[in-house]
Image (cartoon, rainbow, N blue to C red):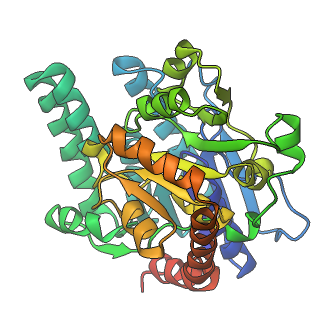
Amino acid sequence: MRCMVHDYAGHPFQVHLSRQLARRGHDVTHVYFADNPGPKGEFERRPDDPRTLKFIGVSLGGPTQHAAGTGAHTGFARRSGDIAYGREIARIVRGLKPDVVLSGNTPTEAQRLILKTCKLDDVRFIYWLQDVYSMAVTKLLTKKLGIAGAAIGWYYQRLDRAQFRLSDAVVAISEDFVPLVTSWGGKVRVIENWAAIDDLPVGSKDNDWSREHGLQNGFTYLYSGTLGRKHNPSLLLKLAQDSANASMVVVAQGFGVPQLQAAQIPAMKLLPIQPAKYLADVLATADVLIATIEPDAGTFAVPSKVLSYLCAGRPILLAAPKENLAARIVERADAGIVVEPNDATGFIAAASQLRKDGELRARMGVNGRAYAERMFDMRQITDKFESVLAGR
């Protein structure tokens, strides 16, 4: 089967799937937006990569000019970037002539152009639903613009509705998405996200990366990944201000980073997103791993960084609505502490509890790793995707 796996964000676990599909004999081209500054997978060819695996990084001129979907631009500039990107991916589809396209993490108007091209060229199109973009846009713009924002949100919901209906299948990452997708006419299968556990062994706090940044000694709270509008940087600020003799390390990019930079808190160390090859050491540096998600994004967003955290064997402090899938996983696995996203007092108290109780940290870290080893079985995950891609 000739497959094109398109992940706008270029995240690690999607690259992991492409490698697994290629190892099963499929001809796989993995396409991503090279200008997007978020966390990236490992796109350099490995010695054991099949010859049938190819990577294409699409650039439209750099993140300062085309930052669609990153929060760097809004309005007309962002929409123009999305459309330009969609046209470029559509051109690649026409050139590759794959049997099937699996496309996710893609802005709505770019996804529309990719889907349209697949329909015209008789290519199966699978919508990999990571986040309901139109719902997030509706909530954000209604808050900012009132009725006008709600109207814009309605337009994007209409586009999403059509795309779900026209896709040959929708792969949703959570059962939470199923009622919406089916009500909008989509044929949905649920395959939960995972992390590339083989690339994330449990490591020592004293490692090359931690020594480079002076973090091999002392207690470290660590946040790694995108810090966007749906996250809450104020919790990280409060923790840094409250944590005497501890470091709050934020390895991130996105909307919330300038707010942290402006605060200039001595206990907070800000670093850019690190290359994928350093991620295991970055996570191993932590004594406690931090993740946050706002209440409005609680149902229709699942922070994938939590899945990488589970692999690291470190306890997780997660501020998220209890109904969010990531919150349910952390509690089900007994891999950390979950607090409501607006409960700053509870967040600080939980951070303090984890800092003081080494046995609790160790137990939760072991539980998280055990969950990852049990659930992130790439043979079973790849079986599910092969079935969807083949239309079974």
Q: Is residue 114 visible?
A: no
Q: How many marks?
A: 0
**Residue 349 seen in render:** yes
User: In the current view of this chain or complex, which residue is farthest to the left?
Assistant: 147
Quarter of the image where one finds residue 153: top left
Q: Residue at horizontal 41%, vertical 69%?
A: 331
Where 6 sits versus 270, above or below? below
Q: Work out whether 203 lies above or below 188.
A: above
Q: Which of 247 and 41 lies nearest the eye of the viewer?
A: 247
Camera-nearest residue between 223 and 6: 223
Quarter the N terminus occupies: bottom right
Image quadrant where one finds the C terminus = bottom left
The residue at the point 43 percent across, 69 percent down is 329
Residue in the picture at 37% in, 74% down: 190
- Please state the horizontal and vertical placement of residue 9, each as a whole percent of the image: 55, 45
* Above or below, comparing residue 272 to residue 332 in the picture: above
Residue 202 pos. (x, y %) = 75, 66
Picture coordinates of residue 48, whole percent (x, y): 87, 71
